[in-house]
Amino acid sequence: MLNSQPRVSDWLHLVRSDFIEMPGLCLTTPQAQRLWGLDLVVCEAVLEALVEAGFLRHTRDGFYCRAGDDTAPRPLVRPFVSR
């Protein structure tokens, strides 16, 4: 029986492709989890593997951005402000 679950290598390819297709993309781990529908363990493994490969960088404020992209990380949505 074939396993229909994507492998980590499949996720690596997909995540890498999305960062290439969307210059300036910077995501936190929770944002990446929601974007690709990944659980925390797989998401962290994929992002860290891409950091170790030198494709992504992990910023001090928790964003994963494409290495060599000088674009400053920006939130995808404006933060909620209570009035």
Image (cartoon, rainbow, N blue to C red):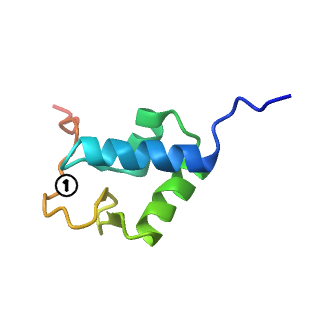
Q: Report the residue marked by disc 1.
A: 73
Q: Is residue 47 above or below residue 2?
A: below
Q: Residue at x 34, y 60 (%)?
A: 62
Query: In the figure, residue 3 lies in which quadrant?
Result: top right
Side of 41 where 77 appears, left or right: left
Quadrant that contains the N terminus: top right
In the displayed structure image, the side of residue 55 where residue 24 appears, left or right: left
Please, is residue 1 above or below residue 48 in the view? above
Q: Secondary structure at mark 1?
A: loop
Left or right placement of residue 56 versus residue 52 in this view: left
| Residue toward you, 44 or 78 | 44
Instruction: Name the spot of residue 50 as percent of width and height, x first.
Output: 44, 61
Q: Residue at x 68, y 33 (%)?
A: 5
- The x and y percentages for residue 43 are 53, 49
Residue visible at 17% across and 37% down?
78
Q: Amino acid at mark 1?
A: Pro
Disc tally is: 1
x and y percentages locating residue 21 in the rendered image: 26, 41
Image position of 81 with respect to 8: above or below: above
Is 21 left, or right, of 51 in this rendering? left
- Considering every residue shown, the one lying at the far front of the view is 2
Percent position of residue 83, x then y = 15, 31
Circle 1 crowding by C-alpha within 10 Å: few under 14, some 14–19, many from 20: some
